[in-house]
Amino acid sequence: MKTIALVGDRSPTVRAHTRIPVIMDALRDGAGFDLDVYWVPTPAAEDPAALRGFDGIWMVPGSPYRSEAGAITAARTARTEGIPFLGTCGGFQHAMLEFARDVCGLADARHAENEPGNPSEDALIVALTCSLAGHEAVVELTGGSLVERLLGASRTVERYHCSYGLSPAFLDLLRAHGMRFTGHDESGEVRVAELPGHPFFLATLFQPELASEPPHPLIQGFANAVTTSTSTSAPL
């Protein structure tokens, strides 16, 4: 049996969290995956040893997390050790934060939600012009990307429950260091990111957990990567 670490601070008030048992049942019973999941609270994830040995890391919605450091450590562990990674909503935001700090050299990269007292103009993760909490919206997908292959389409309509996203000011820098942005809304704002060369590294601002018919193809793709990956302990 393969194991997945669910990095996040479990709460019955977060709808995505309450959907995960339904999703796992669909993966096991409908899709035939032999998987088990374990919740790892973000404070516990501050120690990379808490995540080693898992076959996949799924950073679930529910920000602000109790520990920004734990969320960043989880993204770093998955990225550097070749562990299949899915980051959704807050997971997307903190995966971008980790990449900016550790790969792009932006040691002061900030998440405006985590530092509400500081000006947000220079933050990496900023308040969206229009909150997407409770909304559905079109996402245009890049041809040949991982997300397009998994969905089998060039566009999709997805559900959100977030108010923060990636500042356009930093896109060129993140791209120059290898991050690929493969999903955008109709105005061109980033909604999906992936890391080429990694066994599976996909982050979405939308929440595939909220799909009406689980498992969402992206979650099923992640589960397949977890099942087939043999690189959980080999550094990239």
Image (cartoon, grey):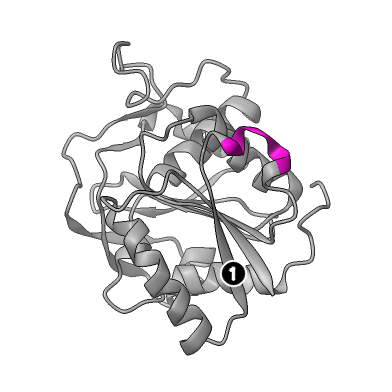
Circle 1 SS class: strand
Specify whether residue 5 is painted magenta.
no
Residue 209: x and y, percent? 36, 64
Residue 234 or residue 48, whichever sits in front: 48
Task: Tell me if residue 116 comes above or below residue 139 in the rendering.
Answer: above
Which portion, as a residue range, is magenta? 44-49
Amino acid found under the numbered disc labelled 1: Asp
Task: Tell me if residue 176 comes above or below residue 226 in the rendering.
Answer: above
Residue 146 or residue 135, whichever sits in front: 135
Residue 168: x and y, percent? 37, 32
The residue carrying mark 1 is 36
Side of 150 where 81 appears, left or right: right
Q: Quadrant of the N terminus?
A: bottom right
Residue 196: x and y, percent? 64, 54
Side of 144 where 127 appears, left or right: left
Query: Around disc 1, counting alpha carbons within 10 Å, would you say few (fewer than 14), some (14 to 19), or many (20 or more)?
Result: few
Residue 49 or residue 195, whichever sits in front: 49
**Magenta span: helix, strand or loop, mainly?**
helix
